Image (cartoon, helix red, strand yellow):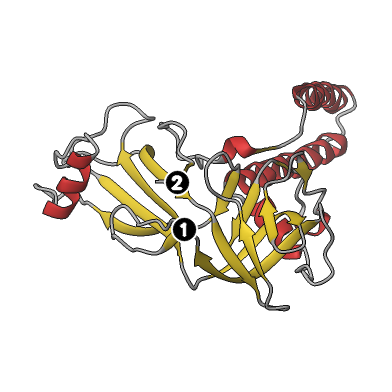
Amino acid sequence: MSQNNLSHSHSNSNVAQNSHYFNLPLPSLALYVVLSLFLLGLAVSLFILVVVHNPLFFLVFLFLFALIAAFLLWNSFSFRNNRTILQYLRSFPDSDLSIASHGQLVKITGLVSCGNVSLESSYEKVGRCVYTSTLLFECGELGLKPVDVKESCFGWRLAYSERFSTDFYITDKNSGIRAFVKAGPDSRVIPLIIESRLVTTTKSCKVLASHLRKWLKDRNLSSEARLLRLEEGYIKEGSSLSVFGILQRSSDAMVVTPPEELISTGCLWQKMLLPVDVDGLILGIP
């Protein structure tokens, strides 16, 4: 089957598997500079507090540091949850395919249809899809051995993932022009698709459901009763989708391909977001 496997490796983290296709372009030197300034400011403010007995400078320093820390934590959270790329995609206007030029960065929103190959979701068996993802989370302590169903849950870790995409067509909702999207083999794809939670076992679960056990056994995973969470997402034929990539235009066809170079989202100051470098074709729900 001509499909694009986006699950390059299993992970013990709940970070998205496609995260290697984008990154925060912040050098490590910047973090060391911020840390050095913090230590210097702390030392000076404490000196003034002890010698001059004036707490004003110390309180101002703590306030400024809290703002900077909140800003960095917000950007870290947004990066891990794809918020920056989603905001950039939504703020980018839809392109007019009737006048778009060859090699132009375009955003196309419309209905998708399958190409020569269609996909089927792993767990629910939903057919005629152009993208599918199935994620299995286990409850364990800091990514160590999964806990028994009788124990408490201290955190979820991603134990297994399946992500696939394939080439498909998209019909622009504005012009009605149909374009071919290269999301199949050898294409770098960033799917901004939220998975739905299908199965969550509880501490009272003694035996897993037969369908879940079969799904686990088919993938050589343990089918013993334990705390599990299974999520699945897909883009089915006829769904509305936004595609962000490079337009390759010829006399008889329009093809959208992944950008050859990194694309920066730029600083989204209205949302207090730092720039993120993106390397791949973006698929998102409008």
Q: Residues within 10 Å of mark 2 (few under 14, many from 20)?
A: few
240 relative position to 223: left or right: right
To which residue does mark 1 refer? 116
Q: Are marks 1 and 2 in contact (CB under 8 Å)?
A: yes
Q: Is residue 286 visible?
A: no
Type of amino acid under label 2: Ser
Q: Residue at x 33, y 26 (%)?
A: 144
Q: Whole-percent x and y of residue 163? A: 44, 46
Mark 1 Cα-neighbour bin, 10 Å: few <14, some 14–19, many ≥20: few
Q: SS of the residue at dot 2?
A: loop
Q: From the top left corner, tell me how far across and down residue 174 is, in percent.
A: 72, 78
- What label does residue 2 carry, if any? 2
The residue depicted at 39 percent of the width and 64 percent of the height is 128
Secondary structure at numbered mark 1 = loop
Quadrant of residue 181 in the image? bottom right
Q: Is residue 65 left or right of residue 23?
A: right
Q: x, y (%) of residue 276?
A: 73, 43
In the figure, residue 9 lies in which quadrant? top left
